[in-house]
Image (cartoon, grey):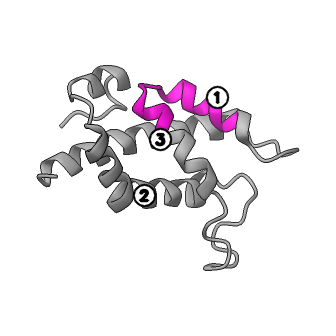
């Protein structure tokens, strides 16, 4: 299977019809929400807390997940996600643009793969 990293994300995702709203909610509840929160915690982590005091800080970036997945549901690409990460970065921090782009690329690739796996599992 060709991944978004090797082809344009939009082209790759347009091969799939969008999930109906009910399935989207089920995917988010059972898989997507947890997976995206883990990416934000372990890979984005703009305040540098990953692993520092688990489980007490494990939900630090949960409030960022919903808006990001909504962007993806509406067809946002990795550049739009990177711009969003820069815009919502907690005040005064200066995470590099490269880090935002790398994280956004990971998030967009994850989104496509997670939706594909959800469908392949017969959901």
Does label 3 or label 1 sit earlier along the sequence? 3
Whether residue 7 is situated above or below residue 72 in the rendered picture: above
Local crowd at mark 2 within 10 Å, few (<14), some, or many (≥20)?
some
Which residue is depicted at the point 47% across and 41% down?
69
Disc 3 target residue: 69
Image check: 94 left or right of 26? Answer: right
Indicate yes or no whether the magenta region holds residue 82. yes
Whether residue 62 is situated above or below residue 93 in the rendered picture: below
Q: Give the range drawn in magenta.
A: 69-86
Which residue is depicted at the point 61% across and 70% down?
58
Q: Percent from the top left, x then y, of residue 1?
A: 17, 37
Image check: 86 left or right of 37? Answer: right
Disc 1 target residue: 83
Image check: 46 left or right of 3? Answer: right
Does label 2 or label 3 sit earlier along the sequence? 2
Q: Is mark 3 on a helix, strand or loop?
A: helix
> Which one is nearer the viewer's eye here, 3 or 83?
83
Main SS category, magenta section: helix
Q: Is mark 1 on a helix, strand or loop?
A: helix
User: How far is disc 1 from disc 2 in space, using C-alphas?
Assistant: 21 Å
User: How far is disc 3 from disc 1 in space, using C-alphas?
Assistant: 14 Å
Disc 2 target residue: 35
Q: Is mark 2 on a helix, strand or loop?
A: helix
Which residue is depicted at the point 72% across and 33% down?
87
Local crowd at mark 1 within 10 Å, few (<14), some, or many (≥20)?
some
Callout 1–callout 2 Cβ contact below 8 Å = no
Instruction: Tell me which corner region of the image, top left, top right, bottom left or bottom right, holds residue 94.
Output: top right
Does label 1 or label 2 sit earlier along the sequence? 2
């Amino acid at each position: 299977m060709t991944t978004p990293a090797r082809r344009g994300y939009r082209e790759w995702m347009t091969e799939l019809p969008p999930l109906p709203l009910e399935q989207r909610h089920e995917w988010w509840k059972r898989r997507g929400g947890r997976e995206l929160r883990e990416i934000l915690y372990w890979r984005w982590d703009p305040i540098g807390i990953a692993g520092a005091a688990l489980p007490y800080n494990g939900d630090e970036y949960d409030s960022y997940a919903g808006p990001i997945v909504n962007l993806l549901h509406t067809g946002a690409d990795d550049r739009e996600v990177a711009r969003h990460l820069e815009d919502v970065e907690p005040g005064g921090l200066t995470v590099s643009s490269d880090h935002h782009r790398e994280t956004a690329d990971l998030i967009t690739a994850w989104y496509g793969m997670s939706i594909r796996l959800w469908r392949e599992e017969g959901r």
